[in-house]
Amino acid sequence: MENRVYGKTMELNDIFEARFVRNRSRLLFGLFCLSVLVRFLTAEYVEYGGDCVHLWINIRRVLDGLSFNAWNHHTMRWAINLPLLGVVKLFGPHPQVYYILPTLYASVAAVLFYLIGERLHGPRLGFWTSLLSILYPQMTQTGSQIWPGVFELTYIAACVWLLLVWLDENRLKWLVLAGVAFVLAWASRVTAVYFLPGLVLLIWLPERRFKPVLVFGAVIASLCFVELLYFWADTGNILGRVGVIKSTHGSQTELLVTPAKYLLRAKGFLKLRGLFGVLVASIGACWFAWKGGDRRVRAVAVLFLVHVFLEAYMISGLNPFKVAQPLGTRYHTVAAPYGILLLLLALERLDGRRRRVKTTLLGLLLAAFTFFSFQKIPATLSVLQMTRDNRILSQALAGRSSILVRYTPWEPNWIEARVMRLFGYSGRRKNLGADEVLRFMGKNRARIYALYAPDIRIPVQKVLPEMSKRSKYEYVLSASEREEPHVGVEFGRKAFKAFPLPQ
């Protein structure tokens, strides 16, 4: 039995791998279903950040015949907004519908990582790359939130796979579709450009031809020009989407750095905590990739390394000096599967007596990813919790009832505390200042309104206009002060629960 790999054939002398080939369709379907199951079990409650809450409010506004609140970096992400509008239009604005799109995109990405690994080195590499991307611990968050990351992840994976198909078949349509996929990634988050050097190298390096690079670039440039014209006409900003993003996303003080802190930015990768070791091992695996003879794998190594470097050192302004984005797992996850793929390829080089070492390392990686992912399964599954919360809070908001809101400061569990201590990361403080608690209360107020307000056409200022302090961690959201709250909400860093109060 043979498997075609970039114009060559490779003998499959392993029965395990041969079964992959025979049952390919069922395997792909199984990986997709496994991803859906893992995303359902490990899903976090809806985040109260702007990417989630404000985008959900705006989607509901559009479906109710209103417009976006404003053009900003959230509403400019049309490759997210358009699919989201379609899903909510089809299933309705019920809170549980929120999880459909991130789950779907994460599961499609899992299939694409199989296809990428299969093209590069065979079905076994595809299987393990897909499985470890499903179980990658940060996917419990990325795969359950309407953040740009899960969309960028999937569109870039589609682009890489389409380029690998084009290299095998040399048909123009695959190259054009790869350009379209990249533009969709760009339209999800502009930092998709971090992948561009690696993608260009993937086109050029195998056969050293410049014409396909020009075609790929022409497709991207044409679509981006159309995008610019549309947003210029709609917003009046001559730079289109980029200009609007720069004017609405440029005020984050956390992005301002001194030259000394800029040079030490790579220390921020310690925020990956337990995944920092995987990052270091993946970077080391790039050396083995470069030593190998497959130029496509070399291009993937460059794609990964350039993205990691730009995560830390890309700048968005000189006066004042400002980096493009914070560092953290939510930004690194889009590149992590390529590091895992390269790490798996490096392990494939261990043969003979070292085969046991390979098996042991692979087993440890699988066990760690599985443990840390399933350790995040909430006591009550988020989708089910949201169903209960919807029954309680939608009635309270419809009747303009007061709601008691209690904030519970986050504390790391036993495992998290020891991992953070190992890498010198302190995490969020337990004792928060009153201003910080008030800020979280305001964000949670917006989340309650976005998810559970029966009529989004009534602004939050009328549904929940007042926020009265009872204690440092307790506030009352009320439309009037004529009654005591009948409903309570307890929330924390990753938790949310509504419950009726005893009368």
Image (spheres, grey):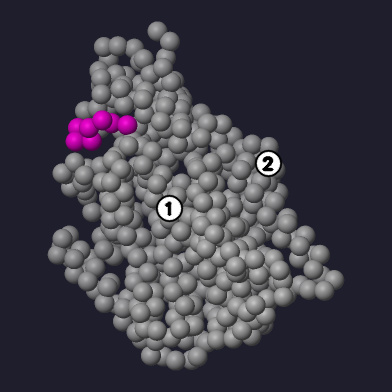
Residue neighbourhood size for the residue with mark 1, other residues' Cα within 10 Å, grouped as few (<14), some (14–19), many (≥20): many
In the image, what residue occupies the spot 27% across and 15% down?
A: 481
Q: Which residues are magenta?
A: 452-459
Asked if the stretch drawn in magenta spans residue 456, the answer is yes
Q: Nearer the viewer, residue 230 or 325?
A: 230
Amino acid type, label 2: Ile
Q: Nearer the viewer, residue 435 or 303?
A: 303
The mark found on residue 415 in the picture is 2
In the image, what residue occupies the spot 22% across and 71% down?
A: 226
x%, y% of residue 8? 59, 86
As helix, strand or loop, the secondary structure at mark 1 comes to: helix
Dominant secondary-structure state across the stretch colored magenta? loop
x%, y% of residue 133? 57, 58
Is the residue 463 above or below the residue 90 in the image? above
Is the residue 46 above or below the residue 330 in the image? above
Task: Residue lying at the far right in this picture: please name it.
Answer: 353
Quadrant hosting residue 392? top left
Q: Which residue is mark 1?
A: 104
As helix, strand or loop, the secondary structure at mark 2 comes to: helix
Residue neighbourhood size for the residue with mark 2, other residues' Cα within 10 Å, grouped as few (<14), some (14–19), many (≥20): few
Is the residue 308 above or below the residue 386 in the image? below
Q: Disc 1 or disc 2, which is closer to the eye? A: 1
